[in-house]
């Protein structure tokens, strides 16, 4: 629509004659996007992008729709005709349009801001699991039919459900989905990284746009599945995602860009597809034929006469007639064609490159920082590099996306930072800080999370309804301050804040934060119960609250004057166990002699000491603490009882 209408002189003339035209980047202004999408859904019964709104000067919409061609065709009204007709109505029947805008605004305010309160119980977790199970595609993974979106928070909910309940089917659904997505064309087998969604059921044909947030959340899903299963493939896929982001999506200053377009030379997917001849020209006849056979590159093509490389039907032949399938097969293919993919990547780099959306969003950067921080403690290689990149990106946000008064901002581009941060910006950045703390135990990260969390409650909390607005209390330019609890392509800011509140309560001993979380659970209870599988990150927070969540404090042992340095060694091994194991309902703190900054903010830490100079661990569940533990073996056994 941008190409065929907004860059067209005739359309521009109509717009400029009768309208004040405003084109909004919905990623830069998610508050506007959400608010006016609600209007579109009320007016038309559906939503989507591009979103087209016509409103009064008071910002009250009276017309909404999605895509309009320049001229009427195929049952779709043309934009030129539409704009001309509405301009005539505005001139002749303005009062009717104004009245329509008033009525619609009143309805949307009433419907979109009031959630149905009610108590939640463990039954809602079982209901969410059963609905996901019923909607699961056992053949291709994922949920539902085409188009298919990754929706990683559904997978991370299932991982937690499996951990608490031992339900193997939950883990099987996650593994099947992650494997099929990786095998499909939604994953870029030549350059790495995941596209936004698949247009078909089998994950073969993507919408080729790559988003930072998808890759961050998918990296987290693969990392956590690797923690649980110890299967190397999942760790390798997480590494591939990081390879893509660090190579293609990282700014010179160290922050992360938002997206890469689907089109090059005005053709969707052209940058990514291959013919057999192109493959053989790069790899030679023998290797090229094996690559084509393995990655489904054929003369007839699997996408508009060309080919999207994929592994959906591949089997690895070990030259003895034996064929592997499943996880082992994928790992062998990964190794066999590593150099071939590198050569193809270099060749592909000569093509006309995709447009890069180089704006830097605080929220999406928060997600990628969280993913990299997790990668730094979970993966076996490149740990220091991932941590360095995560810390550099955080430093960029704290310096470049903070105004002169210390207020967090939402967007940076070409040296300019703009817009007070939204709820998602705060929530996702606090998530990142908590992950960085668990990966480094540097107190400044936890202290900054505590500070930002106070700002969230001051700027966004609704005392009457006990939930959070999307925009801050001093936002002035919106018709309505929207609230969002639905976990869509991204988990909602309310959902992420819920889990942040619960973890911060356990990390700091400030249990008023936990009380806030429980008030939010109640405020949205009936809403959640009506469609629990639509709130899977929200339910991850509820599962945390329902589980015997644990707080672990490790106190550093002392170096002795003699050759015995075991206390220090015990300390590092205890911390490594905490970091490597999948413990989604456990938070941990570390105290060392050099690191006493937390004592003022976390007073309960004063009670914890290294007994007789040896590394000592304290484990508390449901606010009840066990006897102190010493020795790595005893600590390892105790962790097996946590989740």
Image (cartoon, rainbow, N blue to C red):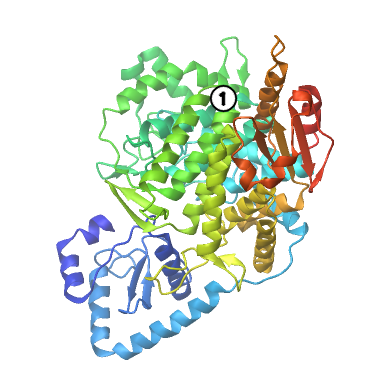
In this view of the protein, can residue 419 be seen by the observer? yes
**Residue 46: x and y, percent?**
47, 67
What SS does tag 1 mark? helix
**Residue 340 higher or lower than 242, as above or below:** above
Q: Where is residue 49 drawn, in percent x and y?
A: 39, 60
Left or right of 172? Residue 253 is: left
Quarter holding the N terminus is bottom left
Tell me residue 625's x, y (percent): 81, 42
Picture mark count = 1
Q: Quadrant of residue 597?
A: top right
The residue located at (81%, 36%) in the rendering is 641
> Measuring 74% from the left and 33% from the top, which residue is drawn there?
609
Most distant residue in the front direction: 561
Q: Is residue 351 above or below residue 477?
A: above
- The reply, left or right, for residue 4 in relation to residue 370 is left
Q: Quadrant of the C terminus?
A: top right
- Say which residue appears at 60% left-offset and 12% top-offset: 321
Residue 402 in the image: x percent, y percent?
39, 51
Question: Compared with residue 445, is residue 113 higher up or lower down, i.e. above or below?
Answer: below
Front position in the image: 149 or 513: 513
Residue at label 1? 330
Residue beneath the point at 66% across and 34% down: 591
Q: Is residue 170 something that shows in the picture?
A: no
Q: Nearer the viewer, residue 548 or 29?
A: 548
User: Badge 1 local density, few (<14 within 10 Å), some, or many (20+)?
Assistant: many
The image quadrant of residue 633 is top right
């Amino acid at each position: 629509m941008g190409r065929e209408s907004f860059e067209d002189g005739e359309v521009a003339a109509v717009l400029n004659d009768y309208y004040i035209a405003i084109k909004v980047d919905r990623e830069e202004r998610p508050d506007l996007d959400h608010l006016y999408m609600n209007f579109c859904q009320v007016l038309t019964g559906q939503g989507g992008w591009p979103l087209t709104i016509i409103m009064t000067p008071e910002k009250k919409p009276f017309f909404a729709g999605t895509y309009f061609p320049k001229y009427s065709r195929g049952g779709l009204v043309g934009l030129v005709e539409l704009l001309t007709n509405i301009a005539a109505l505005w001139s002749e029947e303005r009062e009717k349009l104004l009245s329509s805008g008033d009525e619609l605004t009143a309805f949307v305010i009433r419907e979109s801001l009031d959630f149905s309160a009610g108590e939640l119980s463990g039954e809602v977790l079982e209901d969410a699991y059963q609905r996901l199970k019923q909607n699961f595609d056992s053949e291709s993974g994922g949920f539902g039919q085409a188009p298919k979106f990754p929706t990683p928070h559904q997978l991370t909910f299932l991982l937690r459900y499996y951990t608490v309940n031992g339900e193997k089917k939950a883990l099987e659904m996650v593994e099947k989905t992650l494997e099929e997505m990786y095998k499909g064309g939604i994953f870029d087998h030549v350059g790495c990284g995941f596209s936004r969604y698949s247009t078909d059921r089998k994950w073969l044909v993507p919408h080729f746009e790559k988003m930072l947030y998808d890759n961050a959340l998918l990296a987290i899903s693969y990392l956590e599945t690797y923690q649980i299963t110890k299967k190397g493939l999942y760790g390798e896929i997480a590494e591939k995602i990081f390879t893509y982001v660090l190579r293609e999506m990282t700014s010179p200053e160290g922050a992360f860009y938002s997206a890469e377009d689907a089109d090059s030379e005005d053709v969707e997917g052209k940058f990514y597809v291959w013919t057999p001849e192109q493959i053989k020209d790069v790899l030679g006849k023998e290797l090229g034929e094996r690559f084509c056979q393995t990655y489904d590159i054929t003369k007839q093509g699997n996408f508009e006469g060309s080919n999207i490389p994929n592994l959906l039907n591949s089997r690895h032949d070990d030259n003895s007639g034996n064929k592997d399938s499943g996880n082992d097969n994928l790992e062998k293919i990964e190794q066999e064609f590593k150099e071939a993919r590198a050569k193809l990547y270099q060749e592909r780099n000569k093509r006309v490159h995709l447009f890069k959306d180089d704006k830097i969003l605080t929220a999406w950067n928060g997600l990628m920082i969280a993913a990299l921080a997790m990668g730094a403690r979970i993966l076996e290689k490149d740990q220091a590099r991932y941590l360095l990149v995560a810390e550099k990106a955080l430093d960029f946000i704290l310096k470049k996306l903070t105004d002169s008064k210390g207020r967090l901002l939402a967007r940076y581009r070409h040296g300019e930072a703009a817009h007070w941060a939204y709820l998602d910006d705060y929530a996702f950045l606090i998530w990142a800080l908590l992950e960085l703390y668990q990966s480094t135990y540097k107190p400044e990260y936890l202290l900054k999370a505590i500070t930002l969390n106070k700002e969230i409650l001051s700027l966004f909390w609704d005392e009457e309804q006990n939930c959070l607005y999307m925009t801050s209390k001093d936002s002035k330019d919106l018709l309505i301050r929207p609230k969002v609890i639905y976990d869509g392509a991204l988990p909602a800011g309310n959902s992420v804040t819920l889990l942040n509140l619960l973890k911060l309560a356990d990390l700091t001993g400030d249990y008023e934060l936990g009380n806030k979380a429980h008030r939010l659970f109640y405020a949205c209870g009936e809403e959640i119960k009506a469609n629990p599988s639509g709130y899977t990150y929200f339910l991850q927070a509820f599962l945390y609250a329902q589980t015997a969540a644990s707080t672990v404090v490790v106190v550093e042992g002392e170096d002795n004057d003699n050759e015995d340095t075991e206390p220090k060694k015990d300390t590092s091994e205890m911390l490594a166990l905490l970091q490597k194991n999948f413990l989604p309902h456990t938070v941990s703190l570390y105290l060392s002699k050099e690191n006493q900054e937390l004592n003022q903010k976390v007073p309960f830490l004063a009670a914890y000491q290294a007994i007789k100079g040896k590394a000592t661990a304290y484990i508390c569940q449901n606010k009840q603490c066990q006897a102190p533990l010493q020795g790595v073996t005893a600590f390892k056994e105790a962790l097996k009882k946590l989740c």
